[in-house]
Amino acid sequence: MTTSVKWLGHSAFQVITGGKSILIDPFFNGNPAAQISAGDVAADVILVTHGHGDHVGDTVEIAKRTGALVISNFEIITWFQKQGVENAHPMHIGGSHRFDFATVKLTIAHHGSELPDGSYGGNPTGIILKIADGNIYFAGDTGLFYDMKLIGEENIAVAVLPIGDNFTMGPEDSIKAIKLLEPQTVIPAHYNTWPLIDQDAAAWGDRVATETSAKPAVLQVGDEYIL
Ligand code: NI
Ligand code: MN
């Protein structure tokens, strides 16, 4: 079995494992970095880290079209259900659940989570996907926090970290995060979508390679990393 992680732009990723398509924060319509539209993407599962529009994205449209199982925190799942999403599974921070595609664990993230219509979206989360090919940690939108040390104890093969700065940690703090997490590989996200979060990912990758034990995997939108 192989597992792939494809960057779909901004914080949107597609993990394919065991023949299933798992979307993370599927923001396509209105995403200047996206190369695909919500009407085209395949999904068996959709995971949403927090309530902001650039992460909730097109979840409702994709879930209704595909019947994909939607997983997020309790408050966001309640909001999705009010919009007619039927196949949904609420979780919350610290909880794990074994699904047929992976074990999912939600972690803390330091950020906001208000939903696009102003509804309360609970606390923001990160996501750990525990897969036989290796554990993948999606930090979501967050600043640096020292408890990443504990997340690192989960044996992270691939960490997906924001580096855009302004709304999340930037390159400098991401280096500290990598030292706490000690993943084998790190993929940058949440940058170059808009000028406000432009970053030099190649320069960041050089720093990761020289200053940490992790291997940087700087993807172009549409590229995939194979575990
Ligand atoms: Ni956000
Ligand atoms: Mn965001």
Image (cartoon, rainbow, N blue to C red):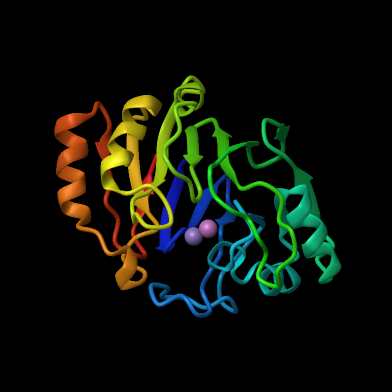
Q: Residue at x 30, y 55 (%)?
A: 219
**Quadrant assignment, res 45:** bottom right
Relative to residue 154, is residue 19 depicted above or below? Answer: below
> Can you say whether 133 is above or below 139 in the image?
above
Work out whether residue 55 or residue 137 is closer to the camera in this orientation and state it: 55
Query: Residue 163 at what x, y percent from top left?
Result: 33, 51
Q: Residue 82 at x, y = what percent?
A: 85, 67
The spot of residue 107 in percent (x, y) is: 60, 35
Q: Is residue 19 left or right of residue 7?
A: right
Number of numbered discs present?
A: 0
- State the residue at coordinates (45%, 24%): 152
Of the 4 image quadrants, the one containing the C terminus is top left
- Residue 129: name its quadrant: top right
Query: Is residue 204 or residue 110 the one in the foreground?
Result: 110
Q: Foreground residue, 212 or 118? A: 118
> Residue 195: x percent and y percent?
30, 72
- Taking the spot 24% from the left edge, 59% from the top edge, the residue there is 199
Identify which residue is drawn at 34% across, 54% down: 165
- Against 125, residue 200 (above or below) is below
Query: Relative to residue 9, is residue 14 depicted above or below?
Result: above
